[in-house]
Amino acid sequence: MHYTDLHTHMLFGVDDGAKTEMDMCRMVDASYRDGTRTLCLTPHFQPTFYGDNRAAADFAFGRLKAYAAEHYPDLSLHLANELGYYTGCRLAIHEGECRFLGGAFLLMDFSPDTTLFQIRYAMDELLSSGYRILLAHVERYPALHGEEDLILDWTRRGALLQVNASAFSRRASFAMRRRIKKLLRRVPVAAVASDAHDVLFRPPLLSEAEAFITAHYDADMAHFLLSYGPSKIVKGESPM
Ligand SMILES: [Fe+2]
């Protein structure tokens, strides 16, 4: 299976992902070797923390495209952002400062200590403004544990859900595995992505997740989560 990885931090020098151009190239090497043929670069968009990294992202993306053209001509590359929600971000979104996945979806992230009230407020604010949201690593927010009904309600209002591949890793904790099992039973997930930050600790690998999902669920589900779902999103279409 060829994967579409729609959430990575490979662009060097822009956020907490790749530090150097060499780091970036090694991450792309690993991703391609693992079977990814469509790759989205989603540097954090959070000016309050990372500053204005748009020009740096454009520069790194240009270097990445040149490297891929030489080594991996069949690798499709897309530039977007991961929005780290902050008060007032709607103005920046409205003014086009944050790049959408597939030109249509806001990949949205909250810090782990965000309260349920804050997440609900943010989701309501952006969904009711007509934005199409892909909620990044839905399994990772402590405030959403046990809130499957609320998450389901967001999906009914058009939100899509992304889970990190690490949740299907051998290294995932027992609690995480239990949480994923409950989530997948109750809410529709649109995509699994690596959310890669480096080659060692948060690598751009999806094949382990494919093996895990195939073994514990089935091959159709693995194909949907790692290939069909994310490829639709990259085209700006909902896979649900
Ligand atoms: Fe991320």
Image: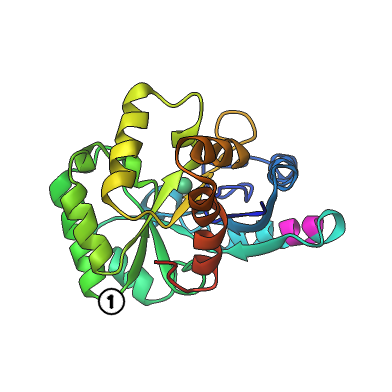
Q: Which quarter of the picture shows residue 114?
A: top left
| Left or right: 207 as drawn, with respect to 174 | right
Q: Amino acid at mark 1?
A: Gly
Identify the residue position indicated by label 1 in the image.
130
Q: Which quarter of the picture shows residue 217?
A: top left
Residue at image x 24%, y 75%? 129
User: Where does residue 156 sit, x and y in percent of width and height?
Assistant: 24, 66
Residue at image x 49%, y 44%? 218
Q: Which residues are magenta?
A: 63-68
User: Where does residue 216 sit, x and y in percent of width and height?
Assistant: 46, 35
Residue at image x 31%, y 55%? 85
User: Where does residue 21 sit, x and y in percent of width and height?
Assistant: 72, 45
Is 160 part of what is drawn in magenta?
no
Magenta stretch mostly in which secondary structure? helix
Between 210 and 134, the one lying in front of the other is 210
Picture layout, residue 208 above or below residue 134: above
Q: Quadrant of the C terminus?
A: bottom left
Q: Which quarter of the picture shows residue 134?
A: bottom left
| Left or right: 23 as drawn, with respect to 8 | right
User: Where does residue 144 sit, x and y in percent of width and height?
Assistant: 22, 43
| Left or right: 165 as drawn, with respect to 160 | right
Between 27 and 157, the one lying in front of the other is 157
| Left or right: 93 as drawn, with respect to 144 | right
Picture layout, residue 205 above or below residue 121: above
Residue at image x 35%, y 76%? 94
Between 134 and 9, the one lying in front of the other is 134
How many residues crowd mark 1 within 10 Å: few (<14), some (14–19), many (20+)? few
The colour scheme of the drawn protein is rainbow
Considering the numbered disc 1 on the image, is that residue within a helix, a strand or a loop? Answer: loop
